[in-house]
Image: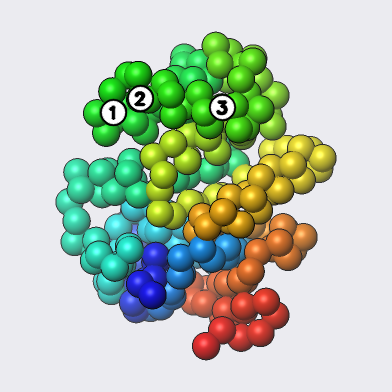
Amino acid sequence: MVPIVELKNVVKEYANGPLKVTALRGISLQINPGEYAVIMGASGCGKSTMLNLLGCLDRITAGQYLLGGEDISEFTDEQLSEIRSRRIGFIFQSYNLIPQLNVLENIEVPLFYQGVSESDAHERAEALAERMGLSDRLKHKPMELSGGQQQRVAIARSLVADPILMLADEPTGNLDSKTGHEILELIDELNAEGKTIVMVTHDDEVADRAQREIRVFDGEIVENLWKGEVSP
């Protein structure tokens, strides 16, 4: 089985004036197809840096990153942009919807960059909107939606290009408990259908839903647990 994600001795450093700050210290990790993993740790531990690297939003300083078996460590910015649009789906705490676009248009955004025809994009976006319970909100702008509805739009957008990896950053952080529970159930369903999901969370109850728990401390993985047992 080819891992969806394989990090090999990944280091990430940031320049802080004349100093270098090391955010990740030789991380090695595999995420296999169909896994649902959570990354946990205190603020500043490196978990958000890990997610940004996995999502090709930032570059590694040293080591290797293989996505679906392909080494993308030395890809250009243009190549990484292509990877983000075609192979990775993002779900953010703050939704990151485009306020000027309606629900249908927001879902279609990744397809625009792929050159998908307008009719095909509409068909795919409408099908996902229906699945998310948004069929009667297609022409609404984000500001006209509840937080839960906005997150459903974001999930639909993350799915529209059929990515091999879905990344979620505290996806229920801005939602009330009932709505957050509904969103987590939806993510559970997507994983049950075979989607590979990596989520950053600080909530133990959220982490309990995942198959795997990765704890980060001071830029290193200190625990890698699979259903309560240490992974091989």
Q: Amino acid at mark 2?
A: Asp
Give the residue displayed 50% in from the left and 23% down from the top: 126
Element type at marker 3?
helix
Q: Nearer the viewer, mark 3 or mark 2?
A: 2
The percent coordinates of residue 77 (x first, y second) are 21, 47
Q: Which label is found at residue 129?
A: 3
Question: Residue 13 occupies which quadrant of the picture?
Answer: bottom left
Image coordinates for residue 56, horizontal then vertical, percent: 34, 52
The answer to whether residue 35 of the structure is visible from this angle is yes
Left or right of 84? Residue 139 is: right
Name which of mark 3 and mark 2 comes first in the sequence.
2
Left of 65 or right of it: where is 205? right
Please report the residue visible at 64 percent of the width from the left and 50 percent of the height from the top: 189
Numbered badge on residue 147:
none
Q: Give the CA distance from mark 1 to mark 2.
A: 7 Å
Residue at 40% x, 54% y is 164
Which residue corresponds to mark 2?
A: 120
Mark 1 and mark 3 lie on one chain; the one further toward the N terminus is 1
